[in-house]
Amino acid sequence: MDISVIGTGHVGLVTAACLAHIGHRVIGHDSDMAKMDSLLSGKIPIYEPYLEEIVHENQEAGRLSFTKSFERAVHESSVIFICVGTPPKENGEADLSAVELVSRRIAEIAEDYKVVVEKSTVPVETGMWIAKTISVYGKGQGFDVVSNPEFLREGTAVFDFLHPDRIVVGLLEKGGEGERAMKEVYAPIVDGSFRCPVHPEGCPSREIPFLVTDIRSAELIKHASNSFLAMKISFINAIADVCDRVGADIREVAEGIGLDHRIGSHFLRAGIGFGGFCFPKDLQAFIRISEKLGKRLRILEEVERINAERIDIAMEKIKGMLWILNGKRIGLLGLAFKPNTDDVRFSPALSLAKRLISEGAKVTGYDPKAAFNAKVEMEGFISSKCIRKDSFEIAESPYEAADGSDILVLATEWDEFLKLSWERIKGLMRRPAVFDGRNFLDGEMLRGLGFEYVGMGVR
Ligand code: UGA
């Protein structure tokens, strides 16, 4: 099929590359010309496992191309995926101006029937507005609007696209051309007839549900899924605080809860909370749209409150170990909002770093992938708050972060932190103390080596 993808951010670029990889001809377009220049010259602006190789492979095979021309992207495709950003406004609502602009331009440019796919994460009823916009500004060329929410995790987005738990397609009218086109788009994934970059020997076989719903239900599935996952995290974090009060261990509690298959073991890792550009903003947007519709989702307000409190609790624990923060040197392991990504947007690690330097500590951060993005964000914060410039520095290795520090704080659970030589680290630190914000390290082993070890709800 001939597909275009408008918006080549994280979701758009992965979608374009994977759709080309399963056999479609795909054109990617973005209004950010610097991003286009970089993609046209073969540079991938984000880090995502397998992405670079499938972009290059499919560019070479002629299935994937990029264009600066919005018109070309529209004219040369029958299915158009809208993957533009929906950033939060000041009040937490999703800013849909990019979605509206793209819909209007498609309406003005398209000369024949198109299937317009809403892939950006949007509040319920956006699909209805897209359809209204296209029919008002269009020339009667005929179109279908489809909601096709994405469930891609950063760091495993290519894997998730090619091995989804489900494909959700929401339609204004079931059984028509839009539904047929979407079945054709995803057929290679449903029947497993693509060459998998993750499993060169062949993917483990499993059935992929293709769920056809009405358009509003599909939009709600996206917001409700992210909210439910965020709720699981806040739930386990609240229980972790109870564990702290009685000397129980949240890892054992989570294991015991998760073995009930009705609950499941995923998203029950307690720590300094969730971040990233999805959960915090989607939760806010869902709270706002529901409020607007006359239904206050207090349960999600509490999920947000518990998450915001994680950094206060981490600060209390660090102060409980160091007493005074002013003048202390802190090594910070992990800066990305989670492992296997270079994304630092709404990263709990950086929220913690900002609080620590605001109280006079000097933080030296290390991250295998996110150091550059973290540096940019922290420099912006430092200059806006008139904090000493040398309050935050980047280390080239975990050992450099530990060197001369009074405490080592683990904020993001990168696998490489499991392989550190703690004897060496002990020798480098001013005093051997570890605050494990993700309950990731072996506390017993560290205590055995003479470290003071504190986690979030662990013994
Ligand atoms: C999330 C969802 O998992 C995806 O399904 C969804 O498509 C995506 O948002 C989106 O809306 O685009 P992502 O933000 O990449 O994906 O990251 P997650 O792996 O879900 O983690 C989110 C945050 O929760 C991270 O900060 C992580 O450290 C934290 N987390 C996760 C916990 O604190 N505990 C857990 O048990 C799991």
Image: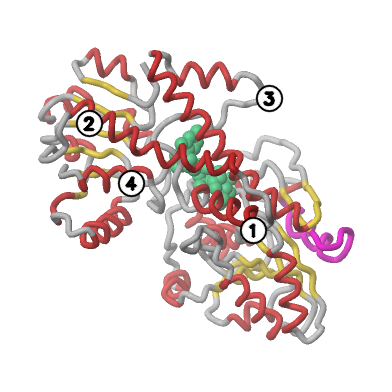
Q: Which residue lies at the image location 56% right of the left edge and 16% below the top edge? A: 256
Q: Earlier in the sequence, mark 1 or mark 3?
A: 3
Binning the other alpha carbons within 10 Å of mark 1 as few (below 14), some (14 to 19) or many (20 upward) gives few
Q: Amino acid at mark 3?
A: Arg
Of tags 1 and 3, the one toward the viewer is 1
Disc 4, SS:
helix
Residue that carries the numbered disc 4 in the rendered image: 351
Report how far apart the C-alphas of labels 3 and 2 lie in the structure.
39 Å
Q: Which residue is mark 3?
A: 262
Q: Nearer the viewer, residue 95 or 156?
A: 95
Residue beneath the point at 68% across and 25% down: 262
- The residue labelled by disc 2 is 319
Residue at mark 2 to residue at mark 4: CA–CA distance: 16 Å
Q: Which residue is mark 1?
A: 292
Instruction: Measure the alpha-carbon separation of dots 4 and 1.
Output: 30 Å
Amino acid carrying label 1: it is Lys
User: Is residue 57 among what the camera can see?
Assistant: no
Q: Nearer the viewer, mark 3 or mark 2?
A: 2
Q: Position of residue 406 (x, y in %)?
A: 14, 32
Of callouts 4 and 3, the N-terminal one:
3
Disc number lying in front (2 or 4): 2
Q: Is residue 145 left or right of residue 339?
A: right
Q: Residue furthest right?
A: 175
Image quarter of the C terminus: top left
Q: Give the residue type at disc 2.
A: Lys
Start-end of magenta stretch: 171-188
Of the two numbered discs 2 and 1 on the same chain, state the one appearing first in sequence.
1
